[in-house]
Image: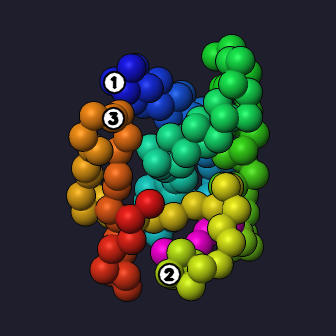
Amino acid sequence: MINDFEQAVTKLRKRLTERETRRQLQRLDQKDNVSKNGEQDSDVVPWSWVFTRLLVLLGQYPSGLTEAIVNAELEVQWDECSAEVRRGVSKRFETLDAFVDGKAVPPEAMFEVVTLKVQVLPGTRTHILSVGTLRVQSCPI
């Protein structure tokens, strides 16, 4: 089941990335906007972003969703997120300090973390991830 979920996330990420690449190429054609080194600036859809957004969607609709609805929903969310990031106005990005400080973190918050350790609780299918950044040693989720 976990492998199926990982494959679904990878497939959705590939679709979103291809769509974003096409959109950027159209923008380049329209604006002739090329970076200094001659390559296009591109938003890469992070695997972790697709993973967390898919988990949230499935949690919101436990009876299930069609692939078309998932694709459409993730495309809309990525458009909103990537536009905010390009403009530099996103308030959704958080640091792990938010957990350490006990701050309430919304489910749509995004983190850039490194996985330090994965543990499976004996007798369960529960995974404990230890993640960290350069500023925080580790923080189990």
The amino acid beneath tag 3 is Thr
The relative height of residue 53 versus residue 103 in the rendered view (above or below) is: above
Q: Magenta region: which residues?
A: 92-96
Q: Secondary structure at mark 2?
A: helix
**Nearer to us: label 3 or label 1:** 3
> Along the polypeptide, which appears first: circle 3 or circle 1?
1
Q: Is residue 49 left or right of residue 138?
A: right
**Residue labelled with disc 3:** 124
The relative height of residue 91 versus residue 29 in the rendered view (above or below) is: below
> Along the polypeptide, which appears first: circle 2 or circle 1?
1
Q: What residue is rendered at 33% in x and 35% in y?
A: 124
Disc number placed over residue 111 in the picture, else none: none
Q: Is residue 54 left or right of residue 31?
A: left
**Residue labelled with disc 2:** 100
**Residue labelled with disc 1:** 3
The relative height of residue 133 versus residue 18 in the rendered view (above or below) is: below
Q: How is the image coloured?
A: rainbow
